[in-house]
Amino acid sequence: MLLAGGGFLAACDSSSSSGATPTTPPTSSASSSAPSQLPHETLTFGVAGPKDEVDAYRQMASLFAPLNRRVTVKVKSWPNETVMMADLRSGAKPPDVFLAPRHDLLWLNQQQVIQPIDQLLDDRGVDFGDDYPRSTLTAFGLDNHLDCLPYGVEPSVIFYNKRLVKLGQVSADPPVPGQGWSLDQFAATARWAVSRHPQAAGAFVGPTLRGVAPFVLS
């Protein structure tokens, strides 16, 4: 999740700076008479992960060029989320915007490392849903306030054994590789394979919280 510190925008997967004074929402007259070129601004963006992943974020930051803004984005990184959270818990100043795990949201909120952003974005007419239903976004907040935003959709991939599964022979609504499978398609395919290969066990989902989370949340 993508997060932002106090006084700045927040989103869910990490944390951001605290203690800043919230900006004053612009009035309609102020926004209509905004200068064509706004002052230069430097923002910090925090990520945790291996070097290759951090390098990709650095490239993204170097290409960030919003309209009518002169913004420089500097990336602050940690080797992993554990080190990042230990740094923040020790009192380190968070970046303006950062990625953090959803399970750290409660602590970040209680310590006022981040601030709710729903009203700030609503006041400025910003569409912050990114096509997510408002009800879905409530999972990224506390006390009916939006404290962070999902930074992306993590794809779920189904691997199947081509020697056991012949998708074109699955009679009822066969799944198509790369097009997504419904649960009904998944079950029908598993039944088809097991009925023709008695030695096959069917399907496997890792017995972890991450593995079962999609089924629980759905």
Image (cartoon, rainbow, N blue to C red):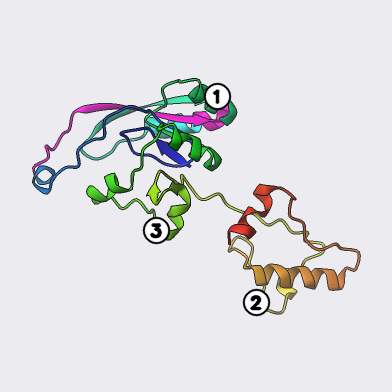
Closer to the camera in the image, 1 or 60: 1
Q: Secondary structure at mark 3?
A: helix
Instruction: Please report whichever mark, 3 or 2, sits nearer to the chain's N-terminal start.
Output: 3
> What residue is rendered at 58% in x and 63% in y?
179
> What residue is rendered at 90% in x and 68% in y?
198
| Residue neighbourhood size for the residue with mark 1, other residues' Cα within 10 Å, grouped as few (<14), some (14–19), many (≥20) | few
Residue 128 visible in this rendered orientation of the protein: yes
Residue 40 part of the magenta segment: yes
| Type of amino acid at the residue the image marks with label 2 | Asp
Task: Classify residue 217 as left or right of residue 99.
Answer: right
According to the image, label 2 marks what residue?
A: 173
Q: Is residue 209 above or below residue 113?
A: below
According to the image, label 3 marks what residue?
A: 134
Q: Position of residue 6 (x, y in %)?
A: 34, 33
Q: Secondary structure at mark 2?
A: loop
Q: Please state the extent of the stretch shown in magenta in the rendering.
A: 33-55
- Residue 129 falls in image quadrant: bottom left
Residue 86 has which mark? Answer: 1
